[in-house]
Image: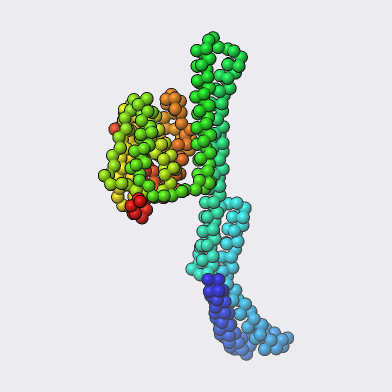
Amino acid sequence: MTDNIVRRLVFKFVLQVFLSVFWTGLATVVTGVVVAAAADARNIVGYFLRFLFSLFPAEGWGVLALIFYFLTFLTLYQYRRFRYYGEMIRAVRHIAEGRFDVAVPVKQKDDFGVLATDMNSLIARLRTSIEEERRAEQTKNELITNVSHDLRTPLTSILGYLGLIDDDKYRDELELRHYVQIANAKAKRLHVLIDDLFEYTRMRHGGMPLRKTRFNLTELLGQLLSQHRLGLQQAGMTASLSAPQEAVEVVGDPDKLVRVFENLLTNAMRYGRDGKRIDVAIRTGGGAAEVDVANYGEPISAADLPYIFERFYRADKSRTEADGVPGSGLGLAIAKGIVDQHGGAIVAYSDARSTVFQVRLPRGEHRPIS
């Protein structure tokens, strides 16, 4: 690539020199003929030219004319390029000063036009990199702010109630047990938040390797619903699983995917309690398995729906603490990260009838489980 560019530049320069020599020779001949005719004239021009020839030989003036014409024609050929150089230098100087909104002008369809195009691509990538760095810094600051707030809130409550207990500021054992229960609930919330934050950080920095294996997705979801039967009863809810008759096999890390479906099931129990039931459906097609987790409680607003997979985003802020099982605001972000690691996708749909979280996972090469 570089050798081709150098060859083209050398060829173009040699061609310009050749054309300059041709026009120089032609202009010199024409000038010689005109000057010779004028020198024989009986007028002031003729007297002046004969005076010049007496000071310096005609051959010398011819050499000077050759040099003058050659430099003139070569400069004319190079003038556009010199002007283009100036524009490129000014643009690069602005970029060096940090003004990335300036682009190098692309005016010629030659190697310098290619150079300008490549420089503009470099500027665009640099601008994108700087914007991503700024967003990353902003995200980091927001993460620190949110974590500090979410850690401080339960910790303040724990310290407050333990302080009351330590100072014997309770009326009887019943009130003491009430204070201990509150402190215990806040400590559990702190534990959940720290665990979720640790897992989210590992996932974001690639520190959570997948141990993929082929497993039966239907069996995994059936066991998960069975494990949550008591929680469902306490919430006054029921759950059903709809799946094909044959085993639905996928390739993935079952331990990580359990976390995904646990988060979705917990979410459905927390926010779909008014609907009294949760429906889990498995479908296959197109080399993938799709799992729908549907609840029939209060819908997610259209304004909140695009952001529910962002960390620390809570669509229903009024009920976050009210249900006794407060979330960290990281569950759906963790679920999305795990599904993305598996090469799948997770989306949410919500209307007045139901809220559905749909997980799509690649099945991999079909091979019966032994």
Taking depth in this image into account, of 243 and 339 the one nearest to the observer is 243
Give the residue displayed 66% in from the left and 82% down from the top: 64
Which quadrant of the figure has residue 320?
top left
Horizontal side, residue 330 vs residue 42: left or right: left
Q: Is residue 159 above or below residue 91?
A: above
Taking depth in this image into account, of 230 and 198 the one nearest to the observer is 230
Give the residue displayed 53% in from the left and 71% down from the top: 1
Residue 288, image x and y in percent? 34, 50
Q: Is residue 35 above or below residue 165?
A: below
Horizontal side, residue 179 vs residue 360: left or right: right
Q: How is the image coloured?
A: rainbow
Taking depth in this image into account, of 102 and 200 the one nearest to the observer is 200
Give the residue displayed 51% in from the left and 62% down from the top: 117
Horizontal side, residue 284 vs residue 113: left or right: left
Which quadrant of the figure has residue 32?
bottom right
Residue 214 visible: yes
Taking depth in this image into account, of 172 and 69 the one nearest to the observer is 172
Q: Residue furthest left?
A: 245
Residue 291, image x and y in percent? 34, 42
Residue 366, image x and y in percent? 34, 54
